[in-house]
């Protein structure tokens, strides 16, 4: 009988397949949770509803998540990451026209860049509903709040850094702290989506774009300046 053990640092045979299968199971559970949370809310969704939707057992759930709250935090982090990646894929392309003019870009150019950025955002209505529930849960559960707040701050910081890098590439910068401005813009966008949902807008995404585009381009234009040489 062969009792030899795998060499130190070497994964057992089939380990890669097991890791990939576990990752797929985790993603299916997150997808199912997204659907169930959107339809029934967090409190109205049981672990059984999530596992039934995903086609797994409770054992599969608990081998990936310690609780429903841990799953919601993982879902928050995944969705924030997906939105950052979507923006990162397009940001340089969207911002590039701002660098083709001498000096500070005209408001029309900034308006066009913002419109393009808004156009690539995925399912904002559903995410707004879900994120609102997540915030309420975090505010009610002290043990959840720190991790949720950390996730929100990380998203804001990474987005601010992305904006700074893109603007710097075309010789521009904000005249105020980019982190504070990014938070202000995100709050404005979220507020516009909440208003559209509450008003029963037939096309919430379009209502948000119309709302945001009334004020955001002029605000961004007023806070954008040419980066001094060598800065």
Image (cartoon, rainbow, N blue to C red):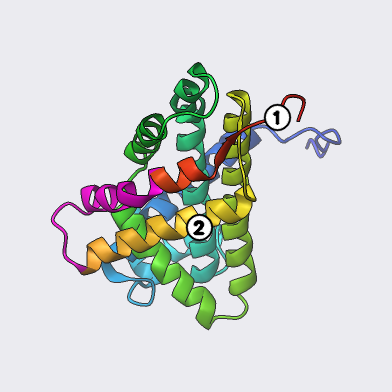
27 over 1 or under it: above or below: below
Segment colored magenta:
199-217
Residue 156 position in % (x across, y down): 58, 52
Q: Closer to the N terminus: mark 2 or mark 1?
A: 2
Q: Nearer the viewer, residue 209 or 39?
A: 209
Which quarter of the figure has residue 103? top right
Residue 154 position in % (x across, y down): 62, 53
Residue 8 position in % (x across, y down): 86, 36
| Labels 2 and 1 touching (C-beta < 8 A) | no
Asked if residue 207 is among those painted magenta in the image, a careful observer would answer yes
Which quarter of the figure has residue 18? top right
44 left or right of 96 in image: left
Instruction: Report which residue position mark 2 lands on.
Output: 184
Cα–Cα span, label 2 and label 1: 25 Å
Residue at the image position 48 percent from the left and 25 percent from the top: 98
- Farthest residue to the right: give it: 8
Residue 209 position in % (x across, y down): 28, 47
Q: Is residue 33 visible?
A: no
Instruction: Report which residue position mark 1 lands on.
Output: 228
Residue at the image position 39 percent from the left and 29 percent from the top: 109
Residue at the image position 36 percent from the left and 60 percent from the top: 128
């Amino acid at each position: 009988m062969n009792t030899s053990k795998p060499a130190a640092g070497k994964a057992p045979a089939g380990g890669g397949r097991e890791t990939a299968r576990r990752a797929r199971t985790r993603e299916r559970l997150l997808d199912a949770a997204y659907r169930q949370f959107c339809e029934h809310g967090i409190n109205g969704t049981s672990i059984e509803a999530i596992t039934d939707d995903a086609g797994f057992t409770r054992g599969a759930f608990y081998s990936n998540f310690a609780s429903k709250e841990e799953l919601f935090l993982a879902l928050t982090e995944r969705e924030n990451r997906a939105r950052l990646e979507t923006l990162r894929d397009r940001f340089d392309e969207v911002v590039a026209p701002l660098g083709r003019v001498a000096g500070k870009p005209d408001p029309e150019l900034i308006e066009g860049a913002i419109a393009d950025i808004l156009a690539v955002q995925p399912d904002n209505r559903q995410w707004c509903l879900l994120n609102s529930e997540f915030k309420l849960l975090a505010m009610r559960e002290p043990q959840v709040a720190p991790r949720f707040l950390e996730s929100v701050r990380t998203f804001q910081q990474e987005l601010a850094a992305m904006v700074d890098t893109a603007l710097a590439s075309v010789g521009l910068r904000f005249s105020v702290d980019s982190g504070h401005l990014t938070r202000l813009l995100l709050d404005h966008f979220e507020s516009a989506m909440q208003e559209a949902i509450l008003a029963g807008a037939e096309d919430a995404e379009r209502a948000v774009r119309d709302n945001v585009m009334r004020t955001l381009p002029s605000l961004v234009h007023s806070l954008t300046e040419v980066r001094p040489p060598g800065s």
